[in-house]
Image (spheres, rainbow, N blue to C red):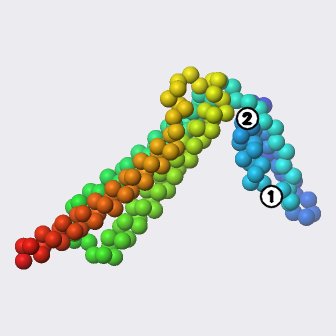
Amino acid sequence: MHLTNGCPLLRRNFPAFGCWTRYTTFRSPLLAALFAQQSPSNTCRFEFEAIPLTEIEVIEALNLHATNGMSGFAIYLTLTFAYLTAIYVVGAKLTGAQTVLLSLLYLAWSTSFAMVAITHLQSLESIVLEYPSLIRARMWFAPWSVMGTTITLAGMAVCVYFLREVRVNDTTEEHEST
């Protein structure tokens, strides 16, 4: 498959020794370099050609990464709100094992969606650094992935603290009422 606008060109062949060859054209030198680092150099031959992005492609890539990053954080915030609601409503009634399982489930899912968001923010930052002359707004140069990571970790710490406070306060109130 070869697309004339610089999209990947893939050609596979299967010689007797079972190796395949891939020729790929990238619009971004950064992507070509990243792909080259991940290729198994001793079994296959890889050739790369880097073609710079046009201004409209940079704008579209920024928009896509920003949108996908916001979607990942929206799911993270939804999971966080659901976890906090569950802990507030039934936190003191949960057994220790149920609390651990609920917390591990929350941490696993929220981390996975937060990592998707942070990955898109890092990609956004890479595009901004690769094409600074095409970026008109200075706000794009902010450290988005650092802010996203900080907010995510702080949110998870607040959730664990909230869990502890709800369980300790409800247990204390039960002992005082008896």
Let me know if residue 27 appears in the view: yes
**Dividing the picture into quarters, in which one does residue 25 lie?**
top right
Residue 103 x %, y %: 37, 66
Q: Quadrant of the C terminus?
A: bottom left
Position of 16 relative to 76 (above/below):
below
Residue shown at 33%/58% (left/top)? 159
Mark 1: amino acid: Pro
Mark 2: amino acid: Arg
Residue 98 placement, left or right of 128: left
Residue 176 x %, y %: 9, 73
Looking at the rendered structure, the secondary structure element under dot 2 is loop
How many marks the image carries: the answer is: 2
Residue shown at 87%/63% (left/top)? 18
Q: Which mark is residue 27?
A: 2
Residue 107 x %, y %: 42, 61
Closer to the N terminus: mark 2 or mark 1? 2
Residue 131 placement, left or right of 100: right
Residue 105 x %, y %: 41, 65
> Which residue is label 1 attached to?
40
Looking at the rendered structure, the secondary structure element under dot 1 is loop
Let me know if residue 8 appears in the view: no
Mark 1 burial class by Cα count in 10 Å: few <14, some 14-19, many 20+: few
Position of 33 relative to 50 (above/below):
below
Residue shown at 71%/42% (left/top)? 31
- Of the pair 132 and 34, the residue shown nearer to us: 132
For marks 2 and 1, give the CA distance. 22 Å
